[in-house]
């Protein structure tokens, strides 16, 4: 999922200080409002218009979320309140534990047959009037799971909807609306799912195999995103392992031949080839089930199958969720979840101190230090988690001057990532040497082929088709207000003597420009949708991925990824993926800069909350015990 450009609250506080930092960092490097989000809910759902784009030289602006795309996609999973977007000191950047491979062969995470457990029975009496959780978060871009592709939206999707399988707190694949893990046959290409009988949508309508077939075919219908091309649909990145999906996306078929309803509670999914990562991919939003009857009325009133239902939403102000009494695992204990958005989510640590938020992502460096202080009052309420995400600088490989590989390599070589981590983030992020984050299967930690070297960078410019920095065309760096853009602006001025422009956009305008591949270079991020290296490599760099905004297209990269896909042995598969990653790093369509560590404050009376390396996945087991 896309991780929206420093969604990370760490960079959104104290804008004046950060703007000054953006100007001073090169020297440092060389030396070493809205409405009350807790008001009584109503049922109205409204919207406001998006902000207009702004052009600045190198300033911080308001932040909108943290990445991914996540669809991986840019900034935080539950973001702001519980976000992979905070940061941490060097001692806290240990990689997350990696699960043990299990059947089917080659799966980089355990596959459990236990299923999603019902909410645990808490000790002590629960006061029904106190089961209200207040938190902050990024805004959502849609309530349609077939169109959601960023981390903030994905967090909300997982409260409102559900699928055949899901990820547990250890990122193992477990049954969800499926009664058990599927039976595999035909060389591990045919998955047969038995559904839970009696599971219902929030409206009370029973969920059947026909609902899943409809949902999958709707998600891959090019009409859903017209007049844009079907390649922009999340289904184009996540569903094409299924036989018939490509034909559906191309408008050559009315249904998906590889999805068959055998009876009311039995669904078959046929793959084009064995894909060990398919079950993990099946946990993503695009595979969530929707009610055909409700879809025809639009998504202003959501009829999902998740533990919560939508009560009220006002863009950039607040979102309110209420308990779903028809939830098939039993109604959650929380009666309401209030998410503060936009200006209401600013200064979340202050709001946490004041008791107005029960969860808060720690933002500014001083706040992180205060929370890390063993003698401080906040230390026991702090949860630190390295995140499965990547923040990166990307180059449009079809736009001058970055259509020249030597220019891309040169622009990568002058960025000192470890020093950025130290001077700008005070070692509260982990500098990236590659695309894959620590804790993800396939992560090696080995330095990539392009390490910091200004002299080599200048030689490459001289060897390029432009011969000299003076011959480079005007270059613009795009972001959503990330102060790192100003640092890079000064870096390129010092290294090449060029006056690079920085242009900051509102998130929605930024996404629109990205989808049209309008940007020469841009800052963005990605967070894991499922714990597999394919989710980063193919999503960001695959030639058919809707999230490959750099336009990278390498036949050798595609061949290596395909060879990896065909391996049933986990180690062999990771070897091919590692070769593909190193090839792409050398081609430099993007420069990995850092991986985040989240810092989340959680009140001691909030129980049952699991914050994973991929963010908070579900609030169904959370309760308030004062």
Image (spheres, grey):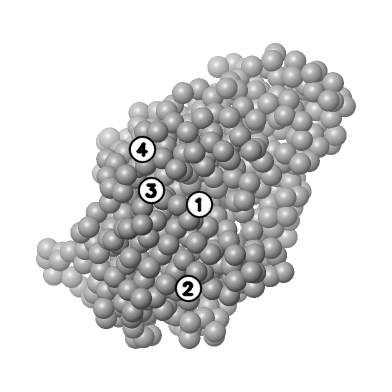
Which comes sooner in the sequence, label 3 or label 2?
A: 2
Of residues 41 and 4, the one nearer the viewer is 4
- At 70% from the left and 24% from the top, the residue drawn is 410
Measure the alpha-carbon separation of dots 4 and 3: 9 Å
Which comes sooner in the sequence, label 2 or label 1?
A: 1
Specify the quadrant of the image occupied by residue 409. top right
Measure the alpha-carbon separation of dots 1 and 4: 23 Å
The disc placed on residue 215 is 2
Which comes sooner in the sequence, label 4 or label 2?
A: 2
Give the mark toward the camera: 3 or 2: 3
Q: CB of mark 3 within 8 Å of CB of mark 2?
A: no
Looking at the image, residue 240 sits to the left or right of residue 493; the answer is left
**Disc 3 secondary structure class:** loop
Count neighbours of disc 4 (C-alpha within 10 A) and say few if under 14, some if 14 to 19, many if 20 or more. Answer: some
Give the mark toward the camera: 2 or 1: 2
Count neighbours of disc 1 (C-alpha within 10 A) and say few if under 14, some if 14 to 19, many if 20 or more. Answer: many
């Amino acid at each position: 999922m896309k991780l929206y450009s420093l969604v990370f609250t760490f960079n959104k506080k104290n804008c004046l200080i950060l703007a000054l930092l953006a100007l001073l960092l090169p020297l440092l490097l060389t030396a070493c409002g809205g409405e009350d989000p807790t008001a009584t809910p109503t049922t109205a759902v409204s919207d406001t218009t998006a902000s207009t784009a702004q052009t600045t030289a190198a300033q911080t602006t308001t932040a909108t979320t943290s990445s991914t795309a996540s669809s991986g996609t840019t900034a935080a999973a539950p973001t702001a309140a519980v976000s992979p977007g905070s940061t941490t000191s060097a001692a806290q950047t240990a990689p997350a534990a990696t699960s043990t491979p299990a059947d089917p062969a080659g799966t980089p995470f355990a596959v459990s047959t236990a299923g999603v457990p019902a909410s645990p029975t808490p000790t002590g009496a629960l006061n029904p009037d106190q089961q209200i959780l207040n938190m902050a978060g990024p805004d959502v871009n849609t309530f349609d799971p077939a169109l959601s592709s960023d981390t903030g939206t994905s967090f909300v999707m997982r409260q409102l909807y559900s699928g055949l399988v899901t990820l547990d707190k250890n990122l193992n694949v477990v049954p969800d609306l499926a009664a058990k893990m599927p039976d595999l046959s035909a060389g591990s290409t045919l998955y047969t799912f038995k559904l839970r009988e009696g599971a219902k949508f929030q409206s009370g309508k029973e969920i059947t195999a026909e609902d899943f077939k409809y949902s999958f075919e709707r998600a891959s219908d090019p009409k859903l995103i017209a007049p844009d091309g079907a390649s922009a649909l999340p289904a184009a990145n996540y569903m094409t392992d299924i036989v018939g999906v490509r034909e559906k996306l191309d408008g050559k078929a009315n249904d998906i031949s590889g999805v068959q309803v055998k009876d009311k509670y039995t669904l078959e999914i046929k793959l084009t080839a064995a894909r060990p990562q398919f079950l993990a991919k099946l946990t993503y939003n695009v595979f969530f089930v929707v009610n055909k009857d409700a879809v025809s009325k639009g998504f202003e009133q959501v009829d999902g199958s998740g533990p919560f239902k939508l009560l009220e939403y006002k863009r950039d102000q607040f979102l309110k969720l209420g308990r779903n009494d028809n939830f098939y695992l039993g109604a959650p204990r929380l009666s309401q979840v209030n998410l503060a958005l936009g200006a209401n989510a600013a200064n979340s640590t202050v709001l946490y101190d004041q008791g107005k938020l029960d969860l808060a992502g720690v933002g500014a460096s001083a706040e992180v230090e205060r929370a890390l202080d063993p003698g401080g009052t906040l230390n026991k309420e702090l949860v630190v988690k390295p995140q499965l995400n990547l923040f990166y600088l990307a180059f449009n490989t079809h736009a001058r001057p970055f259509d020249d590989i030597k220019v891309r390599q040169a622009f990568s070589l002058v960025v000192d990532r470890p020093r950025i981590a130290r001077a700008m983030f005070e070692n509260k992020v982990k500098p990236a040497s590659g695309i894959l984050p620590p804790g993800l299967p396939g992560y090696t930690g080995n330095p990539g082929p392009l390490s910091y070297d200004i002299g080599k960078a200048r030689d490459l410019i001289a060897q390029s088709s432009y011969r000299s920095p003076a011959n480079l065309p005007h270059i613009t760096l795009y972001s959503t207000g990330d102060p790192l853009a100003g640092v890079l602006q000064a870096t390129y001025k010092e290294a090449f003597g060029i006056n690079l422009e920085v242009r900051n956009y509102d998130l929605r305008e930024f996404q629109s420009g990205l989808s049209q591949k309008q940007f020469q270079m841009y800052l963005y991020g990605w967070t894991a949708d499922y714990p597999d290296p394919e989710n980063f490599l193919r999503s960001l760099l695959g030639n058919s991925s809707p999230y490959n905004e750099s336009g990278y297209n390498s036949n050798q990269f595609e061949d290596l990824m395909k060879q990896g896909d065909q391996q049933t042995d986990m180690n062999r598969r990771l070897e091919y993926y590692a070769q593909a990653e190193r090839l792409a790093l050398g081609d430099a369509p993007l420069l990995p800069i850092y991986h985040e560590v989240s810092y989340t404050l959680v009140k001691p009376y909030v129980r049952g909350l699991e914050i994973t390396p991929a963010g908070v996945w579900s609030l169904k087991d959370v309760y308030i015990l004062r």
